[in-house]
Amino acid sequence: MSTRRLIAVVVLVPLLATVALWAFAWPAARTAPRDLPLGVAGPAAATAQVEKQLRQHEGAFEIHRYADERAARAAIEERTVYGAVVVTAQGPELLTASAASPVVAQLLQQAVTRQAAASGGEVRTVDVVPAPASDPRGAALSSSVLPLALSGIIAGALVTLLGLSGLRAVTALVLCAALVGVIAATLAHSWLGALTGNWWAEAGTLALATLAVSGAVAGLAALAGQAGIGAAAFLVMFLGNPFSGAASAPQLLPEPVGTIGQWLPPGASATLLRSVSFFDGAAATGPALTLTWWAVLGLGAVLVGNALKSRARNAVSAADDRELAPVG
């Protein structure tokens, strides 16, 4: 038995290290725009050259056309595009939204400015939705993904290991998530100033993000035993966190990593938090539904697991009673 355990440790630890390095290092090393939504505004005849130059970056940009600067600004504020190139009589103008992603805003500025310089022109840049002055690089927001995931994993694991089940487990998970949301909003919004939207919407988002993870951990544990804790933690930490795109953008990650990341709680929570904090809730429906489904399915699994275990215990108890019953 001891030899098997030794072999298991020797094999599993390097395997986990390999998976972790792949999950974290590979997307970071392959960061580049892939069908990044970008607007082009102005008369068709004037924007044709701009579109041609942008399409030279094959597969990099998903071009959206707008009649004028006003429409392009609205698209940015609605999170339809990350930025837009507006062709004016005075020359090209670049609209960005560093609140959506400082990395993307910088990337667009470099790409468009380089193209304009090659044509002998200059580009004026306007940050339509700027990141908070206290967190211009979005570091505080992107750094919140890991603590929220850890809080959810710890909450789900504690509920399981302490033997809470059924409605008690669900109540504990919900109250814990609500408290985490209030504390996190107080730190990120009220103290650091890294979030600037509606305080209660941000607290609700942070709470829902925590509940999505804690519900998944406790739910899998209720159905599969303590092994479910490890499975859920692996899914959230080794895939959800590096695939979230919180530090850059989902469209900068290799496919299908960017898409998968938005199906998992860390990616959905980062996207939803940006929407409610900087864009008045624009494009919040998708990530909100993703987190809600994770939370609902997780809590439902907790109740189902408790019901199955109760039924199994009752069946065993009934069998024991029949064996002990006097014959005749």
Image: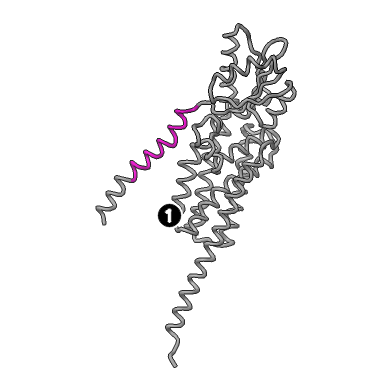
Outermost residue toward the left in this view: 3
Q: Position of residue 108 (x, y in %)?
A: 59, 21
Q: Position of residue 187 (x, y in %)?
A: 61, 38
**In magenta segment, residue 79:** no
Is residue 312 shown above or below 69?
below
Find the magenta span and give its range.
Answer: 12-31
The image quadrant where one finds the N terminus is bottom left
Rendering quarter of residue 99: top right
**In magenta segment, residue 24:** yes
The number of callouts visible is 1
Is residue 34 shown above or below 149?
above
Residue 5 shows up from this direction: yes
Is residue 326 shown above or below 205?
below
- The residue at the point 63 percent across, 14 percent down is 49
Q: Nearer the viewer, residue 270 or 111?
A: 111
* Residue highlighted by disc 1: 227
Outermost residue toward the top in this view: 120
